[in-house]
Image (cartoon, rainbow, N blue to C red):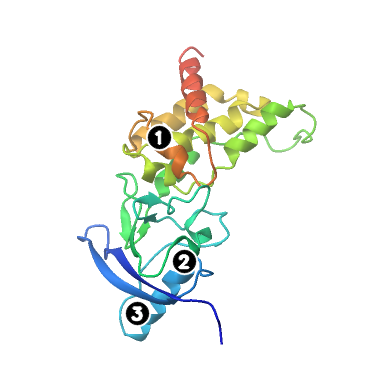
Amino acid sequence: MSDHKTMTLTLIVWRQKGPSDPGKFETYTAKGITEHHSFLEMLDCVNEDLIYAGKEPIVFDHDCREGICGMCSQVINGAAHGGQDRTTVCQLHMRKFKDGDTIYIEPWRARAFPIIKDLIVDRSALDKIVQAGAYVSCHTGGVADGNAILIPKPAADEAMDAAECIGCGACVAGCPNGAAMLFTGAKISQYAVLPQGRAEAATRVKSLVDAMAECGFGNCTNHYECQVACPKGIDVKFIARMNREFIKAQFA
C-alpha cells in the first residue's frame, strides 16, 4: 500500500479532431495523481480512464520522455512547456501542482504550426528551415580528420551552446509574433562561429531567413519570451548574431 498522498486535478484540455475542424476546451478529472508522476504520466492516467469509459483519449506528442527530443510540446496554464525553467513537459512533475488545481492544456499556438489533432501540431516548418541550409556541405572522399582544423575554445563553446537547441518550437509558441528567430538564429550561429561553416555563411543565412518568411513565421520585436520559454536556455544573443550575419551577407 503506497503512503504517497494523491491529488485530484481538473484539466481543461483543448480538443480538435483535425486541422479544418473547430476546436474547443473540454473538462476532465485526473484522479490518484502523486507528486512523483510526470505531467505526461498524469495524462497517461487520464487517457486510461477515458479508454476504459469508451471515450477517445487525449492526443499528445511524446517520444524520449527524457527532455531530449522536444516532442512533448504543450502550453500549460499559458506557458510553453509549463513555465518551469529549462524544463520540457515530460520532465515537468506533478509536485509543481497541488490537490484541487485546475490546469489548462493547449497546443502550440502559431500560424506556422497548424494543429493536427488535439495537442499535436505540425512543426515541419522548422524542418524546412533546416533543409534550406542549416548544415555544412562537404565532398565525400578525402574528408579531413576532425582535429585537423584547430578551433578556439570560446568558439567551440559558443557553437555547442547554439547546437543545444532541440527544435521543439517553444520559442515560437512563446513569442507573441509567432517568430522562429531564436531557432533560426541558433541554427545559423552553431556554424557561423566555426571555420567549417564560413565558406557557406552568406548563402546559409540568406536561405534560412527566406525559408523562415516563406513558412509564415512572424518577426522578432524583442519581447524575449522565446528565451524564457526555451527548455534548453538558448540565448537571444544568437538572434543578434543572425542579424549580423544577414547584414554581412548582403555585401558578400
The CA distance from mark 2 to mark 3 is 15 Å
Nearer the observer, 65 or 21: 65
Disc 2 on helix, strand or loop?
Answer: helix
- Residue 158 visible from this viewpoint: yes
Q: Residue furthest left?
A: 22
Label 3 near label 1: C-beta < 8 Å? no
Residue at 49% from the left image edge and 26% from the top image edge: 242
First reached walking from the N terminus: tag 2 or tag 3: 2
- Of mark 2 and mark 1, the one earlier in the sequence is 2
Question: Disc 3 marks which residue?
Answer: 50
Residue 63 percent location from the top left of the image: 52, 62
| Quarter of the N terminus within the rendering | bottom right
* Amino acid type assigned to the residue bearing label 2 in the image: Leu
Contact? badges 2 and 1 (CB < 8 Å):
no
In the drawing, what numbered circle is on residue 40? 2
Front residue of 171 and 30: 30
The x and y percentages for residue 121 are 36, 55
Location of mark 1 (residue): 211
Q: Residue furthest top?
A: 251
Residue 78 is left or right of residue 1, and the answer is left
Q: Which mark is residue 120?
A: none
Vertical arrangement, residue 183 with respect to residue 205, above or below? below
